[in-house]
Image (cartoon, coloured by chain):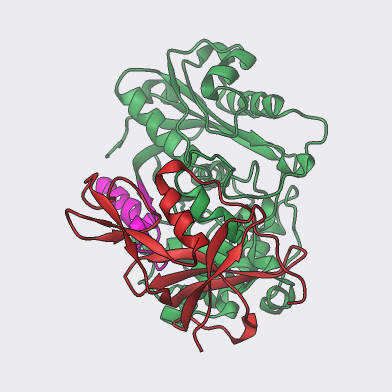
């Protein structure tokens, strides 16, 4: 792709500020429940599995596999929406970037990269691992 | 819950417009209400319950009750996107059974086409906890549903050709509907040759965008029997929600996998009893998922099930969306649930177009998926019976 897609700034809320601060440092984090041990995404103060309010941040490897994806061709710049399943378990919505969409496949190994949204906030995206 | 015999659909009306340049959203709601009242043989003053969803402008039911000059003792603004009218019919039947109203009006209307609205899944409400974690990635209705199609293809070998058959079947029905936006019969090749919107979904895998709306009147049995229209009984209904489950994403099934079995159990019926099905066809993949999840075929076999015209009335085993559906007829307010119920009522009354009328149509199903098939959505399943 010759043109870069403008990434809308995430409408962040105070409870997930550590996620965005980590992203600005190039680190991907998800939340895990201190009581039931289950990781989840998107991050919440309240565990969606046991309703415990004891949730904490877990640093991720940034490795994952493509669960599904679709390249949108209607707008000015084509972009690829995806669900990526992280090594730590949860599947997250993201974009697949810095690749030819025609070469992508479900199950493909990907790694996190960080792209700046239009307000400068880094946002986790993924690119083929090799 | 089993609603068997507690309430009947006594009025149904679909607005003929597909582009409402000169009609306001409130006026469209009133127009369809008037049409359904005339269809039922009732007047405004007979209404004592009112149901609407987020397409109604203002403060839910409160604003539309004022605009239409209704006097009601029961209101319900349950919002579940495109499946809302299906939930409303069920909730109306429950309210009638509970004695909270006798004659309920359900309306849906909108003019996204005239307004030039862009389809967006996520309104930028900063307090919605998911928005920050989705908005930057550009999820739209098209690419979200496309990810469901992609995963289905990966898991089960479903093909674009098979999905295209769903559009082909809808177009065979739409050719008989003078109001349909896309009345031309299309082929599998036409679908595959249409521009790719969000791969693997082509332009003709997507529903139309239209203005318009529809309304339904639900009444208690004594009232229904006193009216002159064929009796369409609410036999059973169920609703269910599904989402990304804290990151345990599984795109191979929808909430209809829960609402369908519950509705069938409440009705004491199986999918084999259904003579006609209205299935929300926002996209071809939406229909395929519902067919599987409701039990019309096994999970993963939807592609083979829909192929070769199996959904075409008079041709296949499972006639669906005989008005042309959202894929060819209309999709008022970007919400398909209302027209699904209306066409099921037409079929049960024997008032569908003769070319698509299902013979001996005594039991019909309407199912809607509101929200996004790929993330959070609510399914509503309604089983109706001609008495």
Q: Report if residue B122 lies within the magenta region.
A: no
Q: Residue furthest bottom?
A: A130
Q: Residue furthest left?
A: A35
Measured from the top left, where is residue B306 in percent x and y? 51, 72
The red chain is A
Residue B52's place in the image compared with B341, above or below, is above
Q: Which residues are magenta?
A: B240-268
Residue A46's place in the image compared with B143, above or below, is above
Measured from the top left, where is residue A25 in percent x and y? 49, 63
Tell me the residue at 38%/53% (across/down).
Answer: A43
Measured from the top left, where is residue A112 in percent x and y? 49, 73
In-image side of B202 versus B61 (left or right): right
In-image side of B362 versus B125 (left or right): left
Question: Which of B217 and B70 lies nearest the eye of the viewer?
Answer: B70
Q: Residue furthest front?
A: A25
In-image side of B312 versus B9 (left or right): right
Question: Which of A48 and B111 lies nearest the eye of the viewer?
Answer: A48
| Residue B98 showing in the rendered view | yes
Q: Report if residue B262 lies within the magenta region.
A: yes
The colour one sees for chain B in the rendered image is green
Numbered circles on residues, count: 0
Tell me the residue at 61%/25% (across/down).
Answer: B33
Measured from the top left, where is residue A40 in percent x and y? 32, 59
Could you tell me which quadrant the C terminus of chain B lies in? Answer: top left
In-image side of B167 versus B376 (left or right): right
Tell me the residue at 65%/59% (across/down).
Answer: A7
Could you tell me which quadrant the N terminus of chain B lies in? Answer: top left
Question: Which of A69 and B43 lies nearest the eye of the viewer?
Answer: A69
Give the image quarter of residue B272: bottom left
| Residue B311 showing in the rendered view | no
């Amino acid at each position: 792709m010759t043109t870069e897609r403008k990434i809308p700034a995430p409408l962040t809320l105070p409870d997930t500020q550590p996620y965005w601060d980590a992203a600005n440092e190039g680190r991907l984090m998800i939340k895990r429940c201190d009581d039931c041990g289950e990781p989840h995404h998107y991050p919440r103060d309240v565990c969606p599995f046991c309703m415990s309010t004891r949730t904490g941040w877990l640093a991720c490897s940034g490795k994952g596999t493509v669960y599904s994806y679709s390249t949108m061709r209607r707008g000015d710049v084509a972009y690829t929406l995806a669900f990526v399943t992280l090594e730590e378990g949860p599947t997250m919505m993201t974009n697949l970037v810095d690749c030819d969409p025609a070469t992508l496949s479900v199950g493909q190994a990907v790694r996190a990269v960080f792209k700046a949204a239009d307000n400068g906030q880094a946002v986790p995206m993924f690119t083929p691992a090799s | 819950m089993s609603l068997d015999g507690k309430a009947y659909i006594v009025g149904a009306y679909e607005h003929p417009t597909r582009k409402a340049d000169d009609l306001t959203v409130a006026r469209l709601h009133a127009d369809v209400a008037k049409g359904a009242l005339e269809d039922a043989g009732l007047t405004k003053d007979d209404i004592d319950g009112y149901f609407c969803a987020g397409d109604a402008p203002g403060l839910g039911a409160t604003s539309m009750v004022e605009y239409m000059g209704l006097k009601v003792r029961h209101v319900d603004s349950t919002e579940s996107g495109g499946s809302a009218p299906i939930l409303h019919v069920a909730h109306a039947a429950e309210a009638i059974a509970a004695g909270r109203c006798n004659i309920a009006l359900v309306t849906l209307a909108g003019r996204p086409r005239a307004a030039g609205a862009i389809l967006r899944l996520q309104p930028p409400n900063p307090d919605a906890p998911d928005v920050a974690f989705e908005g930057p990635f550009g999820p739209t209705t098209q690419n979200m549903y496309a990810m469901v199609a992609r995963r289905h293809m990966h898991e089960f070998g479903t093909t674009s050709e098979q999905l295209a058959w769903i559009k082909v079947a809808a177009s065979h029905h739409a050719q008989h509907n003078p109001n349909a936006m896309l009345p031309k019969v299309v082929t599998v090749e036409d679908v595959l040759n249409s521009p790719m919107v969000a791969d693997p979904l082509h332009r003709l895998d997507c529903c139309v965008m239209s203005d318009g709306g529809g309304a339904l009147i639900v009444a208690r049995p004594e009232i229904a029997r006193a009216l002159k229209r064929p009796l369409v009984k609410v036999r059973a209904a169920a609703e269910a929600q599904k989402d990304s489950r804290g990151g345990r994403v599984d795109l191979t099934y929808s909430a209809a996998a829960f609402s369908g079995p519950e509705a069938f159990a409440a009705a004491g019926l199986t999918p084999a009893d259904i003579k006609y099905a209205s299935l929300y066809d926002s996209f071809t993949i939406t229909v395929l998922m519902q067919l599987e999840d409701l039990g019309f075929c096994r999970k993963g076999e939807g592609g083979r099930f829909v192929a070769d015209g199996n959904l075409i009335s008079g041709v296949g085993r499972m006639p669906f969306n005989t008005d042309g559906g959202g894929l060819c007829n209309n999709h008022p307010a970007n919400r398909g649930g209302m027209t699904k119920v209306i066409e099921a009522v037409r079929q049960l009354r024997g008032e569908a177009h003769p070319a698509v009328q299902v013979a001996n149509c005594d039991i019909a199903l309407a199912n809607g998926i509101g929200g996004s098939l790929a993330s959070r959505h609510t399914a509503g399943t309604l089983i109706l019976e001609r008495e």
